[in-house]
Every structure is written in structure tokens, then in C-alpha cells.
Image (cartoon, rainbow, N blue to C red):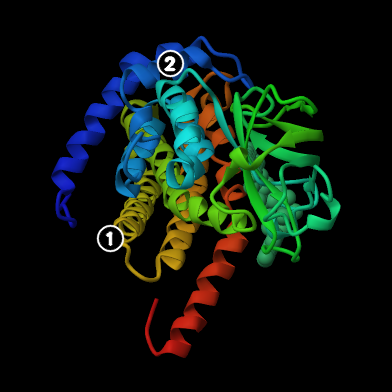
Amino acid sequence: MATPFTGEGERRKGSVELRALAARRLRPVADRGAPGKVNRPLLATLGELGLLSRVVPLTGPVRAQDLCLLRESLAYACTEAETALALQGLGAHPVVAHGTRAQRARWLPEVAAGRAVAAFALSEPGAGSDAAALELRAEPTGAGGAARAGGAAASGWRLHGEKRWISNAPQADVYTVFARTGPGSRAAGVTAFLVPADRPGLGGEPLEMLGPHPVGTLTFDGVPVGPGDVVGEVGRGFRLAMATLDLFRPSVGAFAVGMARSALDASVAHAEERRAFGGPLKDLQAVSHLLAEMATRTEAAALLVQAAAAAYDAGEPGVAARSAMAKLFATETAQYVVDSAVQIHGARALAHGHLLEHLYREVRAPRIYEGASEVQRTIIAKELFRAAGAGASP
Ligand SMILES: Cc1cc2nc3c(=O)[nH]c(=O)nc-3n(C[C@H](O)[C@H](O)[C@H](O)COP(=O)(O)OP(=O)(O)OC[C@H]3O[C@@H](n4cnc5c(N)ncnc54)[C@H](O)[C@@H]3O)c2cc1C
């Protein structure tokens, strides 16, 4: 197929190499892991291969296009490796972008080597899509602490409350935690803290989910944090969370595209091999047209993801809408493609251990996390009206 972007040939070559590497080095380690458990040998292998340091760089920013290339390619061959890599990037990104020298020195080399597990703790039982409703309290400590509820001058805080649906929790080694230092309601007054897992008062439970990656709760019973644990500035944590999601949203789309490509290729092979009514399935027009539709939508999703990532890297305006479009379209497309692939494969796709049974479980969550599809539509619509007001298209 034609290569519409500059450097596209190079990108596709990189993707083929990454897929092969994932199949050879990562797939066997992933297969030895257990569902719902952090796979530390898999993280160590991702570290040894130098893949984690591309999403957790010790210096310089993360490039969205590279993050998307990695996520799409790994997802094609090994979703477990893809997700392990993405979660290290998500959990550590606030420190990569805004960490102090001490925070960076303590954690980034460990996370990039796959020796320490990172997590991003924003969601709460009462604050999912409406993340600005978060209630985890950071109560000031020290003399006159309560009077300094503004937080800026506090000598420290104690965290009280709960986080829920946190990937890698409670097995991670370090959490970026968003808490309310106040004053101000909603997005104002939220601060990001870097909380090591061994802080007193920090607990949590694993949650059993449809997909295989680890997710759990975190409970904070007076967990002590100090000024040295603040990531970025006191009271500006919500912006930091949203900036992290701006980078990761297109890459969730890339994860979806990788799964869609994998399901599509399996379906093409199956339609060539499987015989019914005296010939291969591909001779049935209903099947070949379905494959054509799956391929077309997957290609469109891939192009939207790439355009959003390129716009992010170039610092172009309108990135929020582009990222939202990429995530929305790619995750909805992957759901359609994986479901269609199951249909083409028939019963065998639903047998435990089949690639499509695995993808069918994996493909559902990305339409919910990092902003459900409905939330992405709201972002896109807001940008449309904002741009219309400013006399430009997004
Ligand atoms: C596998 C998995 C991993 C996750 N990992 C993390 C993590 O690492 N860190 C973290 O902080 N969180 C994580 N989450 C949580 C995730 O971000 C939330 O689930 C998500 O933000 C949605 O919140 P909710 O589940 O509470 O749904 P709700 O906010 O209750 O929304 C439910 C539904 O209501 C509808 N809806 C909500 N708002 C709107 C709106 N404005 N307009 C129209 N419809 C709307 C949508 O259909 C939505 O799906 C994870 C979730 C999953 C499933």
C-alpha cells in the first residue's frame, strides 16, 4: 500500500522488526506469566531490550510517534508486553516531564530497566470519567497544618482515601498519586505526589478483570508525603495528569490498531485455509467483503493515530481533538475488527487460549480507560465549537 507520510517506509520497517522481536523474545516470557499479576521477568526483558527507555527516557521528552510505533508493534505480537511497557510509561511520565532531580535519579533508571514497577493513580470510586471530582485528601501536617490548607507552605501532608481501577496496583513499586491539597474545587487544588509502595498506611487489593493485565485498588490511611514527593507544583497536579493523557491517548489508539491488524491477518489466513461449501471461505463474497471492510477501517484508524502523534510531536494546535479522534476511532474500530474476526473463525475463536479469544478480552477496556468513547466525543465537539468561535477548523 502507498506510504502517505514522510518516513512511513522507515516506520513500517521498524514495526516489522519490533513484531519479530516481540514474537521471539517477549511472547515466551509473557506466556510464563499469570493473568492479573505483574510479570517482572517480562518487564526486565523489555528493559534489557532497550524498549522501556524509549518510553521512560532519562533525558529528553517521549516522542508520541515512537510510543505509538512501539505500542502498535508489540500489541500485534504480544499484548501483555505492550501493556507492561505502556503502564511503565504512563506511571513514570509525570516524573519524566516534571520530576525533580532527586525523583528522576531515584526512579527513572529503575523503571527504565524494568526493575521497578510504576503506576498512575488518578481514578477513584466516585471519580472516573469525571476525574476532577477526585476526593483523595492531602491533609497538611506540622504546626498550624490545618491553617495552611492552601498547601503551598505545608511541611508535609497525610493522604487519606481510596483509588480504584489502578493498573499495576497494588503490586507496583511507585505510584504517581493525584490528591486534593485544596483550596479550590474540582481541577484546582489537586497535587501530584510520587508515593513509594512501602510508605506506611498504603494498602490495596487486586481486582479480577476481563482482560489479563493487573488492576487493583489503593487505600491511603494517613500515608505521609513531604515536599520532596511533590511532582511539579502544588495545586497544579490536574494539568499534569491531563498532559500525560494527551500524550498517551493516541497511543491507546496505536495499541488498538496493533490488535486490529493481528486479528485481520489471522482472519485473512483463516479465510484462505478453511473450506466450506466446496471451496475456501474467501470465495464467499460475504467473507471477503467483511475482510475488505476490516482492512479499510484498520488503515483509517492507523492513519488517524499517526496524524495525532505527529501533531503532538510537532506541537501543533488542536492536539486534544486529534488525539480524541484517534483514540475514539481506533478503539471502536478494533472492537469491530476483533468481533468480525471471531465471526470469520467460528467456534474455534472462542476456545480458551485462541488468539482471538485473548484479543476479544483485551479489546474491550481501551474503549473505557483514559476517557471513554463518549468522553472523547465530548472533547471533539468542544474543540469544534471552540474552533468555530475562533474562525478555524480543529
Ligand atoms: C482495565 C482498566 C485499567 C485502568 N487503569 C487505570 C489506571 O492505571 N489509572 C487510573 O487512574 N485509572 C485507570 N482506569 C480507570 C479508568 O480511567 C476509568 O474506568 C474511566 O475513566 C471511566 O470511569 P468509570 O469506570 O468510573 O466510568 P464512569 O465515569 O462511571 O462512566 C460510565 C459510563 O458513563 C458514560 N459517560 C461518562 N461520562 C460521560 C460524558 N461526559 N458524556 C457521555 N457519557 C459519559 C460512558 O459510557 C462511560 O463509559 C482503568 C480502567 C480499566 C477498565
Q: Which residue is mark 1?
A: 314
Q: Left or right: 188 with respect to 24?
A: right
Mark before the other along the chain sequence, 2 or 1: 2
Q: Residue at x 71, y 26 (%)?
A: 199
State the residue in front, 385 or 301: 385
Residue 278 can be seen, yes or no: no
Q: Say which residue label 2 marks.
A: 44
Determine whether the residue tagged by mark 1 lies in a helix, strand or loop: loop
User: Alpha-carbon distance for marks 2 and 1?
Assistant: 32 Å
Give amino acid for label 1.
Ala
Q: Position of residue 125 (x, y in %)?
A: 79, 46
Q: Residue at x 51, y 70 (%)?
A: 380
Q: Amino acid at mark 2?
A: Ala
Q: Is residue 85 above or below residue 378?
A: above
Query: Residue 239: percent from the left, percent from the top?
Result: 56, 59
| 333 versus 107 height, above or below | below
Q: Is residue 49 above or below residue 394?
A: above
